[in-house]
Amino acid sequence: MRRPRGEPGSRAPRPTEGATCAGPGESWSPAPNSMLRVLLSAQASSARLSGLLLLPPVQPCCLGPSKWGDHWPPGGGPHAGPVQGLQRLLEQARSPGELLRWLGQNPTKVRAHHYPVALRRLSQLLGSLPQPPPVEQATLQDLSQLIIRNCPSFDIHTIHVCLHLAALLGFPSDGPLMCALEQERRFRLPPKPPPPLPSILRGGQRLEAALSCPRFQRRPQQHLIRSLAEASPEELTPHVMVLLAQHLARHRLREPQLLEAIAHFLVVQEAQLNSKVVQKLVLPFGRLNYVPLEQQFMPCLERILAREAGVAPLATVNILMSLCQLQCLPFQALHFVFSPGFINHISGTPHALIVRRYLSLLDTAVELELPGYRGARLPRRQQVPIFPQPLITDRARCKYSHKDIVAEGLRQLLGEEKYRQDLTVPPGYSTDFLLCVSSCGSVLPVRAQDPFLPYPPRSCPHATRDPAQRVVLMLRERWHFCRDGRVLLGSRALRERHLGLMGYQLLPLPFEELESQRGLPQLKSYLRQKLQALGLRWGPEGG
């Protein structure tokens, strides 16, 4: 005779193979291949169920001493804390649905230790009932989402507990809950050390690997020097040396040994290098304001420019820009780039504007630094402002700059009418702060004066020169220097050099001095001392 449903030993209808959760509004039952079927059919104690779950019995959690000592007040009641109260609710849940409801409806009160408590109670409920009640899929999904949201705060034990629970309930191993828990478990594993470079890699390959490794992006000098020393000359390819040059320039690393190695490579490999490669090799010398000791460095570059100038116009001008920062401009190359043929050739190219800007700077350098040059010059109609906007590094680091606090100090010290900020003077150099000063040292209102000195300076006779002096306060921020903090970058040194040659009196404000000022009162005192050291006067006594 067939046994009635629900009697011991009777079989429940088998769900379809692999089913884990029912559709909306339907009841949920465990998949036939999940370990939960063992729990449902087990007539065992809580200790046996805990063993089946591979979990130790969970001890009640106490969040600290209270007026009742280490125990809750009788019955919990309104005096129990919300976290402890939720734990008691979980321990006293009468069905899986009620248990999951307490977790899903109290997300702000759930703590990591509540999940082992809920697991223990769920094991007791499912093991003590011959026919478990159905669990709504929506409730189960809410629990799943709650665990996924909170699992980053779990310790490793709680993560293992939840992984076991999810597996026992038949959640798919590639589902969102299992994936989230497994990911958190992996995050807590100790990181594997990076594999060492294979010993079969030779010097040049080791250098290239080091330059490509993020570990050596900040201060890699010693590692690079060691790799370079172990490489034979034939292993140092143009690609490797270009990577090294770009690395030094990008990170402002003024490392003489490495720069000399690049200079020597350029001289030795002169015949095999074209101007597009040479412009990249020369870049760090101008940017880092470093003239190499290699005696053939300049003659080698002059020969390459003579050979390649007409082939790659932009590369040619880039090389000259680096040499301009080093004050090593070759006359023959200047003759070529200022010639009508070269200017006409670049006019219709995509990089015409940047080349004209560089040519304008080269023409300024000829005007100010090469009085003996008698060759072609850039026509006035072709000239454009050199730096019409602040440099990229200044725009990117403006929030770290001292400019705002210095401006406020000058405003309180002198008044807004006696200085100009961020003024660009001909032929296109930006100034941080500009003051106009009378012949007796009084700071004058800037808007009542012409703040610009004439350019070119030698085109104006001395007798007609404006007697007022222009003082430029130059912020020397930390990123205006090479990494060692002692040598100005080539572009900064060039700007200061040219402003001085045009007749502006420079007052540098080094970052070390600015960083040592504590607050606006100290900064004002510092600025007052700096201006008075130049003999400047302002206020009632200064006129």
Image (cartoon, rainbow, N blue to C red):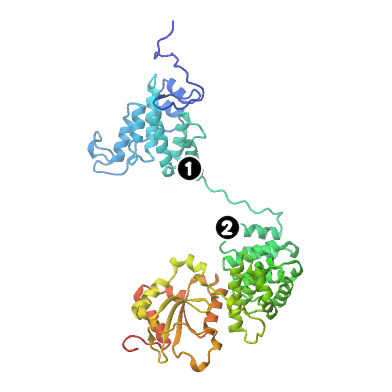
Q: Where residue 224 sits in the image (x, y, percent)?
A: 64, 64
Quadrant for the C terminus, please. Answer: bottom left
Which residue is nearer to you in this view: 219 or 432? Answer: 432
Q: Which residue is mark 1?
A: 184
Give the structural element (helix, strand or loop) at label 2: helix
Give the structural element (helix, strand or loop) at label 1: helix
Which residue is nearer to you in this view: 27 or 196? Answer: 27
Q: In which quadrant of the rendered view does residue 264 lie? A: bottom right
- Which residue does the image show at 51% across and 67% down from the upper left? 393
- Which residue does the image show at 45% across and 15% down from the upper left? 11
- Which residue does the image show at 63% across and 59% down from the upper left? 210
Q: Where residue 108 sits in the image (x, y, percent)?
A: 33, 42
Q: Do we see residue 325 in this rendering?
A: no
Q: Count up the numbered dots.
A: 2
Q: Where residue 41 sits in the image (x, y, percent)?
A: 44, 20
Which amino acid, by three-letter code, is at mark 1? Glu
> Label for residue 215?
2
- Which residue does the image show at 42% across and 33% down from the upper left? 56
Q: Residues within 10 Å of mark 1 (few under 14, many from 20)?
A: some
Which residue is nearer to you in this view: 373 or 69? Answer: 373
Which amino acid, by three-letter code, is at mark 2? Arg
Q: CA distance from mark 2 to mark 1?
A: 25 Å
Q: Do we see residue 384 in this rendering?
A: yes
Q: Residues within 10 Å of mark 2 (few under 14, many from 20)?
A: few
Q: Please say if 525 is above or below 319.
A: below
Q: Are marks 2 and 1 in contact (CB under 8 Å)?
A: no
First along the sequence among labels 2 and 1? 1
User: Is 434 on the left or on the right of 85, as rendered?
Assistant: right
Q: Please say if 44 is above or below 286.
A: above
